[in-house]
Amino acid sequence: MSKDFLAFNTDGDILSLDGKLVRKHGVVVDSSMKAAIRATLGVPGAAEGLTPANNLSDVSSAATSRTNLDVMATADVNDRAYSRQPANGLEFNGSSNIHSTAHGASLDFGTATDFSVFATVYNPGTRNDDCIASSRGGGAVGWFLGYSATGRVQFILGDGTTTVTSTDDGDVIPEGWHVLGVTVDRNGNATRWLNGIPQGTADSVSAVALTINNSNGIQIGHQNSAKLWPGIISDLVIWKRLLTSAEALRWSQDRVIAASDQWANIALALLSENIDDDADWRDASGNGLTATGSATALFDNSREAGTFTPAITFGGGNTGMTTAGQGNYRMIAPKTCHVWGRITFSAKGSSTGTAVLTGMPKTSDDVALDANVFPLRGNNMASLTSMPLATITKDSSQATLYDTGASGVVVLDDTNFLDTTILIFDFVYETK
């Protein structure tokens, strides 16, 4: 009998909620004894979620039970606003994807309010002149955080009369996950941050003396549909105060908002766990500034696995070819697919030309993939000088096959295959 379903009579009996006697104490239990017993057992003072006087009727009535127990509909349970299933952020394609919030009073920093902006991003390669977040819209009033023309952290602050653009110095941001940020002392300097380390010159912004308020929301991954970002943004937080050096480093390491900042000191808190499956990005600060747009929500698919049917084409054709393809895959990390399997020939057919492995389960990333070269095992093949290789074709589900010749790699074609060829593969590639 669960302790959560015990009730106490004034005569000392312990009953289940259906009225059956569980134990008869033989003594009257007064209120102080009840409190002590409940504290020892961890039983709440009233049955959780139920009105004690109506326990049985509540349970028997579906409508009342839903109200008292706060039962969620299936759609609610599946909605990320309730379930908080892990997400990896929003992915922007760099050509048309944009997200934005509405304007809110929490975004108004006037003439003197210090503030800090930090964003966690995945940089697909050396970038330049891209926007991570901006309040400027198409005007000159507000702030901008993004990449400079040389791929460094850039910050811009303007009041319509005076504009300060950060010095183009500091580290060039390489491919990978990074935390970009800025802390803005309105009477002093703006310090740019990369992964918790201050960058380059701390530029004075005291000359920006007029209000930086405007009617814009925060534009994410773009500035007025320009400076489009082609990567992932997983967190964007704006504080209405300066972060210290220690806080900037700690945020870059654990990205946990301090209890003392929740939520009076936060203007906007877009965290990866608050991304809905429709890519709406809900504001955790309580200011109601949900970001909406056309970027794609990335979910944690690292447990996804399945099968696929690999095949070979020669010059894009497979006339008269007979093969048996067996393939398996598993997503071992976000955007990272492990594939393994084999293709067994019983007839190579009459098609001619370059040999291509097709049917991969996930489309590859659309950046250059020249470095993604993987060895294969080929049994019963003709005129090979070494183990065959595969190079994933970008933005596709196929790979071109090669041999390593005396002067470099040589594309494999139909002449390298027999009616009895067996091709075995096992490699990992980056997906969209």
Image: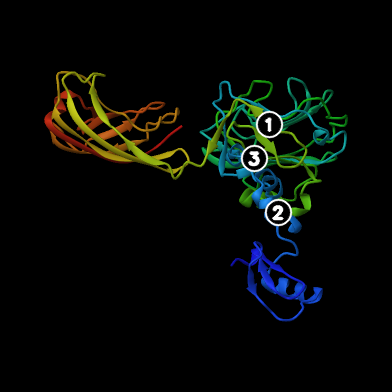
Name the residue type under label 2. Answer: Ala
Q: Residues at badges 2 and 1 in contact (C-beta under 8 Å)? A: no
Name the residue type under label 1. Answer: Ala
Comparing 147 with 268, the one in front is 268
Identify the residue position indicated by label 3 in the image: 81
Left or right of 322, for residue 367: right
Distance between the Cα atoms at labels 2 and 1?
Answer: 29 Å
Q: Quadrant of residue 409?
A: top left
Q: Is residue 376 visible in the rendered structure shown here? A: no
* Picture layout, residue 95 above or below residue 19: above
* Picture layout, residue 410 above or below residue 116: above
Q: For the residue carrying disc 2, how many other residues have a C-alpha within 10 Å: few (<14), some (14-19), or many (20+)? A: few
Identify the residue position indicated by label 1 in the image: 291
Q: Nearer the viewer, mark 3 or mark 1?
A: 3
Q: Quadrant of residue 178?
A: top right
Comparing 149 with 131, the one in front is 131
Q: Nearer the viewer, mark 2 or mark 1?
A: 1
Q: Is residue 254 visible in the rendered structure shown here? A: yes
Residue at 54 percent across and 26 percent down: it is 93
Residue 89: give x, y in percent of width and height. Answer: 58, 38
Residue 246, numbered circle? 2
Distance between the Cα atoms at labels 2 and 3?
Answer: 31 Å
